[in-house]
C-alpha cells in the first residue's frame, strides 16, 4: 500500500470522500482541500493518542482492560503511520519541485 492509497482510505473512512490527485479540481468539485484533510488527520491522530494514553492509565490503575489498551494503541499507531506517509509524500513532492529547472 502506497501513501496515497493510505490517505484515500483514511479519507473515505472519515467520510470526506477521499483525496484526489488534482487538489484544485477536488476543491472546485466540492471535495476537501488538502489543508483541511491534513488538519483532520492530525486532529484524529492526536485524539487517538490521547485515548490510548487514557486507556493505559486506566489499565495500570486496574480500571480498564488490556484489550482496550491494545486496540487503542493499534489505532493510534495506524493514524501515526498515515501522518508519516503523507509527510513523506509532501517532502518527496517538494524535492521533485526543487529539482525542476527554471
Image: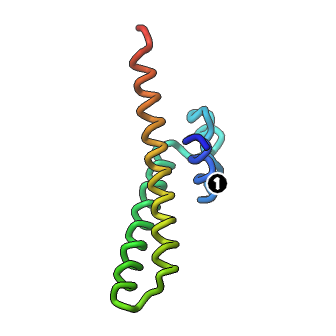
Number of callouts:
1
What residue is shown at x 61% (from left), y 34% (from top)? 21
Does residue 14 lie above or below 65 as drawn?
above
- Check the image and name the residue furthest to the bottom: 62
Instruction: Identify the image's colour scheme: rainbow, by chain, secondary structure or one colour.
Output: rainbow
Image coordinates of residue 96 in percent, x first then y, are 45, 21
Q: Quadrant of the N terminus?
A: top right
Q: Dividing the picture into quarters, in which one does residue 80 lie?
A: bottom left
- Against 55, is 75 above or below? above
Between 11 and 23, the one nearer to me in the picture: 11
Farthest residue toward the top?
A: 102
Neighbours of disc 1 within 10 Å: few (<14), some (14-19), many (20+): few
Image quarter of the C terminus: top left
User: In the rendering, at what x and y percent does residue 57 appear?
Assistant: 34, 81
Residue 10 image position (x, y, % from top left): 58, 53
Please name the residue that numbered disc 1 is placed on. 12
| 68 with respect to 54 (left or right) | right
- State the SS at label 1: helix
- Res 62 quadrant in image: bottom left
Q: Residue at the spot x=51%, y=58% of the render?
A: 78
Q: Position of residue 9 (x, y in %)?
A: 63, 51
Judge left or right: residue 47 versus residue 5.
left
Q: Quadrant of residue 49?
A: bottom left
Identify which residue is drawn at 42% across, 55% down. Answer: 42
Amino acid at each position: 500500500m502506497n501513501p496515497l492509497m493510505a490517505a484515500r482510505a483514511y479519507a473515505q473512512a472519515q467520510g470526506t470522500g477521499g483525496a484526489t490527485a488534482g487538489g484544485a479540481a477536488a476543491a472546485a468539485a466540492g471535495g476537501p482541500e488538502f489543508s483541511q484533510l491534513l488538519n483532520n488527520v492530525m486532529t484524529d491522530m492526536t485524539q487517538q493518542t490521547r485515548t490510548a494514553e487514557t486507556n493505559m492509565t486506566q489499565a495500570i490503575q486496574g480500571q480498564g482492560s488490556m484489550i482496550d489498551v491494545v486496540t487503542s494503541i493499534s489505532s493510534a499507531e495506524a493514524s501515526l503511520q498515515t501522518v508519516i506517509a503523507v509527510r513523506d509524500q509532501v517532502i518527496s513532492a517538494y524535492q521533485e519541485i526543487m529539482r525542476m529547472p527554471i
